[in-house]
Amino acid sequence: MATHLVIGDPHCTPKVSNDRFLWAGRLAADIKATHVICMGDFCSMDSLSTYDRGKKSFEGRRYQQDMDHSHHALSLFNKGLGKHKPRKIMLHGNHEDRIDRFVEENPELEGTMKISDLNLKNMVGKKYHTNNLKL
């Protein structure tokens, strides 16, 4: 019998501790989840937000901090899993897509910023982009 753990919009951000990802990994191991599915927006990518760009509240956000924090969150999740090895599926949400949209609006950054910077394939094993899903 399959057991699925579905995680919706965790919005990993340097503004919040990553401890919850360790706990989520432990939960997946405890319930012996055969599949772990993140519904997208794993990373908030605050550094690329257009919502409050140019405002005082935006200052201090950095792309590399977003990347480092996301990599740390995924490593904690995997640590929480221990020896348990469920199938992990990561859907890209609109927050991950901020990377592609930012490069589209700033073509001089082509090749320097890309979704693969998230390293999801190595950390998750299998990933899907929401635009490629067939329902």
Image: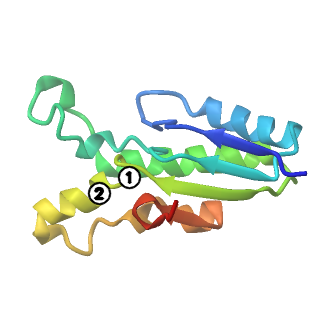
**Which residue position holds label 1?**
96
Residue 59 percent coordinates (x, y):
19, 32
Which is nearer the eye, 50 or 82?
Answer: 50
Pick out the residue farthest to the bottom: 111
Q: Which mark is residue 61?
A: none
Q: Position of residue 69 (x, y in %)?
A: 48, 44
Label 2 element class: helix
Find residue 26 and report its image quarter: top right
Where disc 1 sits, the SS reads loop
Q: CA distance from mark 1 to mark 2?
A: 6 Å
Single out the residue that lies furthest toward the front: 135
Tally of numbered tags: 2
Which of the numbered marks, if any, corresponds to residue 99? 2
Residue at the far left in the pictured view = 54
Residue 88 location, x and y as percent? 68, 57
Marks 1 and 2 close (CB-CB < 8 Å) = yes
The amino acid type found where label 2 is placed reads Ile
